[in-house]
Amino acid sequence: MTKKVIFISGLGGTGKSTIFHYFLEHPIPHFSFFDFDHGKFRVPPYGENHLAWRTKQNKWWLKVASKEYDVKNNIPVIVGQCLYPSQIIKLPEAKPFGKEHIYFVHLLTTPNVRKKRLYARGDKHHWGEHKHWYDDFFNEMTVARAFEVETSRESVASSAKRIQGWLKKIF
């Protein structure tokens, strides 16, 4: 079987952590789930430039993903706000997968639902209306042919089952 890795990403408040915890409670055979933010490097404080941290974290997770595949023969699924797809596939640590075997899931939600979720969890500072890089991120996900899951009106279980169905196609 070919070495593969999957990234589930989206803006803050789209449901990444909730989906991650769902899959921890409802494991899928042949897949291992990892929380991007809980990797080797500590998340920098809000307001600091996160690009350097995301780059180091992505490199580390790709190494972990490669070992996970080699040792357990499981497809690693890394959940969190990763780098843009084009940045990930250019990393030297992505080479064992080949760009055609790095997959993306893009979680989406309406701005009102995102705002409500961010405020409810005490992250008002993460809400700032629309930012210019959002368009770049969305375009990158489209170019990477990311599987899109709109989480505004679906239950967590329903969104997770859609992702699970897509993952089984990758397997």
Image (spheres, grey):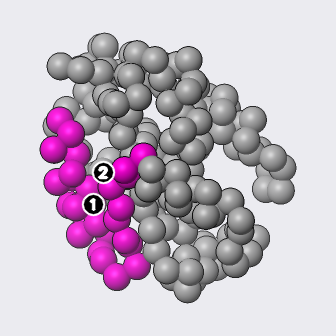
Residue that appears at 74% across and 45% down? 50
- Determine if the magenta segment contains residue 26: no
Residue that appears at 45% across and 68% down? 108
Residue that appears at 62% across and 32% down? 57
Question: Residue 167, percent across and down?
Answer: 22, 46
User: Label 2, label 1: how many angstroms apart (C-alpha)?
Assistant: 8 Å
In the rendered view, tell whether residue 151 sits above or below residue 32.
below
Disc 2 and disc 1 in contact, CB within 8 angstroms: yes
Q: Splitting the image into 4 quarters, where does residue 22 fall?
A: bottom left
Circle 2 is placed at which residue position? 23
Residue that appears at 40% across and 16% down? 96
Indicate left or right for 4 with 126 as reference. left
Question: Residue 13, percent across and down?
Answer: 54, 68
Q: Which residues are magenta?
A: 144-171
Circle 1 is placed at which residue position? 160
Q: Splitting the image into 4 quarters, where does residue 116 fall?
A: bottom right
Position of the N terminus by quadrant: top left
Question: Residue 4, percent across and down?
Answer: 31, 28
Q: Of the residues shown, which amino acid type is indicated by label 1?
A: Ala
Q: Of the residues shown, which amino acid type is indicated by label 2?
A: Phe
Position of the C terminus by quadrant: top left
